[in-house]
Image: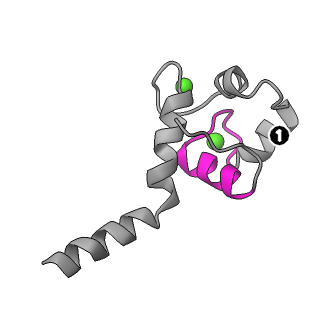
Amino acid sequence: MTKIASLTFMVAMSIPALAMSQVASSLDANGDGVLTIDEVQASFPEMSSDSFMAMDLNADGALDADEVAAAQEAGLMPATDG
Ligand SMILES: [Ca+2]
Ligand SMILES: [Ca+2]
């Protein structure tokens, strides 16, 4: 049982979207689950629209948890400590 529990924990920790979703929600001012450029710039004023568009992989004008995770892995968005 303990082995299975720790394995589950390790698998969960290895999923970036899980950890990053907490970061995303900390930036998500209106709580709709995605980050607009305004919400990103509220925390990262140096973020340019070009950078935002580079992170917005599906070009829908908002960053979902997967896009935030990818952006942070690529070093496009600073990671926050919450
Ligand atoms: Ca939002
Ligand atoms: Ca998007």
The colour scheme used to paint the residues is one colour
The amino acid sitting under disc 1 is Ser
In the displayed structure image, the side of residue 11 where residue 73 appears, left or right:
right
Residue 4: say if magenta: no
Position in image of residue 60 (x %, y %)? 66, 37
Span shown in magenta: 58-74
Neighbour tally class for label 1: few under 14, some 14-19, many 20 plus, Cα within 10 Å? some
Q: Residue at x 37, y 71 (%)?
A: 10
> Is 43 rendered above or below residue 51?
above
Residue 34 lies, in percent from the top left, at 54, 33
Identify the residue at image location x=53%, y=45%.
65
Q: Is residue 70 magenta?
A: yes
The residue sitting at 64% across, 34% down in the picture is: 62
Image check: 30 left or right of 35?
Answer: left
Residue lying at the far left of the rendered structure: 1
Task: Using the image as rendered, state which of residue 50 and residue 61 is in the foreground.
Answer: 50
